[in-house]
């Protein structure tokens, strides 16, 4: 059994050893500042089975997404066949296909997603902010590495561009989740009660994100 390559993060504040496998299948080992290398090696080899399992799950996710993106286009939770066309100058849809101008590159596609994301997400925020007694200071739609949304203590909300690939019920859940953080900046019982009072079915959206989030 060979040991995985890993990124080592030493921290003065840490007391315990931690381990995670990122969505890019990178292994990160977090250790207290002065922990000797042999202890780290032992820790890693004790957890090698877990690492292997977790890494192959992540590689599978990555592969699944790459295969999907070669032939398919995701928008608002629907999968479309991706087709190139010489005779169009903008992205067009029919029921089952998306037609993109021949030669459209990844950057142009991302720009298209960003514009759609801004239109839809700003609109959903303005609908749902009337349900709570607070208004966000600022709403940004941007690339977020590992989160669907965030809410800062000074009332700024950020939403992930990739959400525009999810079904509307999932978009609404993330929007409502972040808006409710304007009232409760934690995941307390009162927070979840507020989310549920606005979206009684929110758990379905939460589960959808957990099982499909890696494809977005
Ligand atoms: Zn939250």
Image (spheres, rainbow, N blue to C red):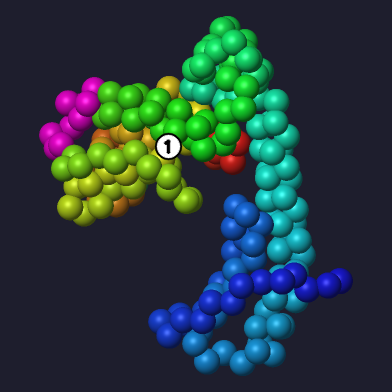
Above-or-below relation of 4 to 25 = below
Q: Is residue 51 magenta?
A: no
- Kindly tell me whether residue 22 is visible in this rendering: yes
The residue that appears at 71% across and 83% down in the rendered structure is 41
- Left/right of residue 77 with respect to residue 53 in the rendered view: left
Kindly indicate the quadrant of the structure image that contains residue 28: bottom right
**Of residues 198 and 142, the one drawn nearer to the viewer in this rendering:** 142
| Residue matched to label 1 | 161
Q: Is residue 159 left or right of residue 147?
A: left
Q: State the count of labels.
A: 1
Identified at 44% across, 33% down, the residue is: 111
Q: Nearer the viewer, residue 103 or 173?
A: 103
Query: Dot 1 lies on which element?
Result: helix
Q: Is residue 201 visible?
A: no
SS majority, magenta: helix
| Residue furthest left in the image | 133
Residues drawn in magenta: 126-135
74 over 155 or under it: above or below: above
Q: Position of residue 151 (x, y in %)?
A: 28, 48
Image position, residue 106 (x, y; %): 56, 36
Q: Is residue 51 left or right of residue 123?
A: right
Report x, y in % for residue 15: 47, 82
Residue at coordinates 20% horizontally, 30% vertically from top-left? 129
Q: Is residue 13 left or right of residue 68?
A: left
Image quadrant of residue 136?
top left
User: Residue at 27% across / 43% down in the picture?
Assistant: 157
What quarter of the picture does the C terminus occupy? top right
Q: Quadrant of the N terminus?
A: bottom right
């Amino acid at each position: 059994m060979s040991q995985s390559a890993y990124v080592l993060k030493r921290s003065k504040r840490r007391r315990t050893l931690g381990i995670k496998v990122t969505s890019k299948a990178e292994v990160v080992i977090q250790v207290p500042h002065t922990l000797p290398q042999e202890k780290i090696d032992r820790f890693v080899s004790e957890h090698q089975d877990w690492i292997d399992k977790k890494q192959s799950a992540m590689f599978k996710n990555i592969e699944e997404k790459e295969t999907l993106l070669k032939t398919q286009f995701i928008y608002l939770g629907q999968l479309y066949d991706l087709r190139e066309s010489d005779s169009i100058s903008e992205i067009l849809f029919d029921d089952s296909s998306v037609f993109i101008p021949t030669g459209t590159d990844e950057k142009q596609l991302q720009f298209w997603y960003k514009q759609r994301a801004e239109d839809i997400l700003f609109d959903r925020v303005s609908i749902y902010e009337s349900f709570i007694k607070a208004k966000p200071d600022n709403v940004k739609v941007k690339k977020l590495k590992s989160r669907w949304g965030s809410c800062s203590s000074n009332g700024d909300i950020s939403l992930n561009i990739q959400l525009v690939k999810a079904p509307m019920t999932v978009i609404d859940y993330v929007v409502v989740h972040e808006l409710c953080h304007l009232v409760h900046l934690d995941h307390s019982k009162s927070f979840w009660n507020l989310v549920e009072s606005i979206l009684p079915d929110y758990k379905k959206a939460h589960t959808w994100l957990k099982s499909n989030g890696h494809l977005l």
